Amino acid sequence: MSDTAARSRIVCTIDFDKSGRQTGYARAPLSRNNSGWGTVEIPIIVVNNGRGPTALLTGGVHGDEYEGPIAISRLAKSLKPEDVQGRVIMMPAVNIPAIMADTRLSPIDGWDINRCFPGNPKGSFSQMLAHFLDSVILPMADISVDMHTAGHSFDSALSTNMHHVSDPQIREKTLAAAAAFGAPFNVVFGGVDEDSTFTSCVERRGIISLGTELGGWGRVNIEGVRIGRRGIDNILKHMGVIEGEPDTVQRDGSAATRHMMVRDPESYVFAPRAGLFEPTHYIGEAVRAGEVAGYLHFIEDVDCEPLTLTYRKDGMIWFGAGPGRVARGDALAVIMEEYNWPER
């Protein structure tokens, strides 16, 4: 038996097929110096009624991303079984050790759980948790909305995101779901460690997979919470799990989501050296190839002139650098452009 096919070590007593509303915990074993039989409790809320699709809503895969957990927790407190046709599985705090530490990486093993899927039940804590999500939770879902923000790494234009999946039917269904979610932007992208992310596991099962980027810079984005809370309601309406039509009107008066893409290395601005980065544009601003993206300062050396960094592509700022002090190789900006992914 392969590691990914082995039985999960995480215990969950929730009956996912039972009608009504259930709350409980998945208990992951964590032996510690002062608790040999210790566990980590991961909250799960399930609302199930009648026949219909299953929507999986996850937040807190990274512990310093706040808008998704807030939006999902609000829904979990208000969603009633009599309003549902189908099933909603809500996990607002997936990576609870990282959430409590306010970190992207797990404080237990130092892993980014979203770079170790499909996981391994015999591996580190993050690998064990990734395996549980992939092998136990995902097979029940018809659509997955995994809610992220840019954490402490960036600020982000408020958006959903998706991979450019090869199956045209799944791709069209995902684009339709993104439009229904109703964020200002939906970004179709590739080239970011696809094989080891939660999204990649969802896609391998032929399930509709949406992510979000609803803020960043280590704070709670007010509009990000609003868009996220409205968006998961919209998804449930789009899938027929609850009644109603999605509301996709934007703050600027536009009627719908704007589909964008990030598909090649020229969309990125990287730091060639460590230093203090001074950006020149905010997220959502239009920029042009050759325009100054910012200045990399070396303030510890009074005789060293700053480096001028430029964009290599026309478009809009999807991600803008979060921390001022950056390391060599850090991404400082990501440019999105209008969606027009060529078919091969």
Image (tube, rainbow, N blue to C red):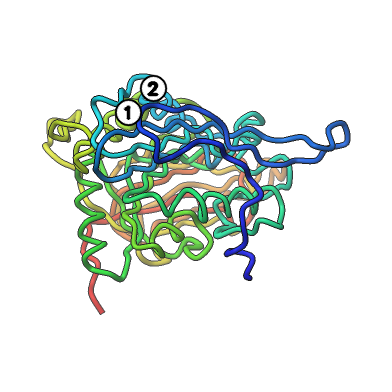
Q: Quadrant of the N terminus?
A: bottom right
Toward the viewer: 163 or 153? 163
- Using a 10 Å C-alpha cutoff, classify the residue at mark 1 as few (fewer than 14 neighbours), some (14 to 19) or many (20 or more): many
Q: Position of residue 76 (x, y in %)?
A: 39, 25
Helix, strand or loop at label 2? It is: helix
Task: Single out the residue that lies furthest toward the top.
Answer: 78
Query: Can you say whether 161 is above or below 236 in the image?
Result: below
**Rendered residue at 43%/30% (across/down):** 67
Q: Which residue is mark 1?
A: 229
Q: Position of residue 245 (x, y in %)?
A: 13, 34
The tally of labels here is 2
Q: Position of residue 80 (x, y in %)?
A: 30, 23
Look at the numbered discs 1 and 2 and tell me whether their residues touch, using CB distance below 8 Å: yes
Residue type at the position of mark 1: Arg
* Mark seen at residue 74: 2
* Mark seen at residue 284: none
Q: Is residue 1 left or right of residue 139?
A: right
Query: Can you say whether 168 is above or below 128 in the image?
Result: below
Q: Is residue 252 left or right of residue 63?
A: left
Residue 205 lies in quadrant: bottom left
**Rendered residue at 51%/51% (across/down):** 136
Residue type at the position of mark 2: Arg
